[in-house]
Amino acid sequence: MFDGLSAKLTGILDRLKKRGVIAESDVDEALREVRVALLEADVALPVAKDFLGRVRERALGQDVLRSVTPGQMVVKIVHDALVETLGGAGEAAIQTGTNPPAAILMLGLQGSGKTTTTAKLALRLEKRERKKTLMASLDVYRPAAQQQLAQLGTQTGIRTLTPVLGERPVAIARRALETARREAFDVVLLDTAGRLALDEEMMDEAAAVRDAAQPIETLLVADAMTGQDAINVASAFHRRVGLTGIVLTRVDGDARGGAALSARAVTGCPIKLIGVGEKLDALEPFNAQRIAGSILGMGDIVGLVEKASEAVAKEDAEKLAAKMMKGQFSLQDMADQFRQLRKMGDIQGLLGMLPGIAKVKNQLAAANVNDRMLARQEAIILSMTGAERRNPKVLNASRRKRIARGSGTTVQDVNRLIKQFEHAAAMMKQAAKMGGRGLMGGRLPPGFGPPTFGR
């Protein structure tokens, strides 16, 4: 989401870091460029002014101007100011209360991803917090809206309230809560109707449902790709209904990022969750420190480790680590790595979590590193026999042609993969000789490959 802003800010700050001494004029010049970058990213003007004012005041302090590394100090100041603007340190948790059933009201415009987000949140509550959850669709206007939520309930295995023909939204909310009380549900998610644009009728209905359900959370689902419109919608809903939090969807798309940077400052409501993909488990807590680090090219190693721990079984990781320590690495191990990477989520999102990745963004784009590429390379390995995976030296020209035909690729693709494997295997042997020190040698993991990856 922050690709454009990240590239500009890291470029501006990198120039400052190269200077041994920073004058007031240097700070002002850099902040003028930062201001343009923020406004181009759809950050609300008042938010941009407040952010720049805080950064300038701190950056012109004596501690910075006299610092041995003034450029690094300015980067820290910008990082801290970003964290404050995004909502402060830590994560704003979804409240479920201590007196079940807790109602969570989902609001938003039509097309914002509200119904899908309702199902994602329900799945998260069931899996992560062990909360027995009931979903109820209050959208009696959009054709098949209630059926859509029911279908998502079937996919996730989460109970959905059975629709009753002609029942109105407030009555549905009351029936959902009564069902939840009777059947001992912990949480009830109320998926309200949306509109293509804000109107008084929608606000009145949302307020009536709020009064009937007395929700512990009132969440606005907003599309990050709508930029300033997302902020306007959030402000309107907050004034009329009263929000407790915001969920930003499609943050994995080509959004400029202004919605995330402005939402907390404009509404005073925390961003609680972000949708990072189409899969039903692609919903994550919003963490201001990690987002700020990502914007400034510092990556999100903690988030990457968390994703890895969820997708990769501990035993599998230990087995692979043991083989690597012995200098053993086969094509089957590489295929397993590709599969694990794909389970962790969108490859572009994973790469974005690596520190400094923005500086090689163009090279990655030229190499066409994406999920399809991983799937293609995995297919090449799976087209080999067991003996070929264990001993790639037997892969002569005729075998490579057969593998290319079987995987729907070219001989050149097969050759590139084998070259990539040989490089990775050499790294493993070198690491084994070093006793595991510098296992990665400053490089990407073997699954991401050497400099020839994708060419």
Image (cartoon, rainbow, N blue to C red):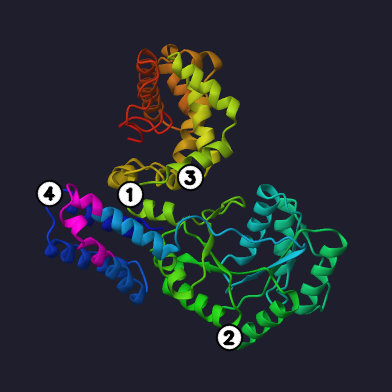
Q: Is residue 65 left or right of residue 268?
A: left
Q: Earlier in the sequence, mark 2 or mark 3?
A: 2
User: What amino acid type should be assigned to the residue bearing mark 1?
Assistant: Gly
Question: Which residue bears the numbered disc 4?
Answer: 20
Quadrant location of residue 438? top left
Quadrant (top left, top right, bottom left, bottom right) of the C terminus: top left
Where is residue 407 drawn, in percent x and y?
A: 50, 30
Which residue type carries mark 2? Asp
Element under disc 3: helix
Side of 194 relative to 349 (left or right): right
CA gap, disc 1 and disc 2: 40 Å
Choose the circle earlier in sequence order: 1 or 4. 4
For residue 157, side relative to residue 38 (left or right): right
> From the viewer's perspective, is 75 left or right of 312?
left
Q: Can you tell which quarter of the image residue 426 is in?
A: top left
Q: Which residue is mark 3?
A: 303
Q: Nearer the viewer, mark 2 or mark 4?
A: 4
Q: Camera-side residue: 364 or 215?
A: 215
Label disc, if present, on residue 199 of the rendered structure: 2
Return the x and y of residue 355 as percentages of the image width and height.
35, 43
The residue that disc 1 covers is: 297
Q: Where does the magenta region start and end? A: 55-73
**CA distance separating discs 1 and 4:** 21 Å
Q: Is residue 72 magenta?
A: yes
| In this view, 154 is above or below 341 | below
Q: Earlier in the sequence, mark 1 or mark 3?
A: 1
Task: Say whether disc 2 or disc 4 marks the residue closer to the N-terminus.
Answer: 4
Whole-number angstrom distance, CA of label 2 to CA of label 3: 39 Å
Can residue 406 be seen in this snapshot?
no
Q: Position of residue 22 (x, y in %)?
A: 13, 56
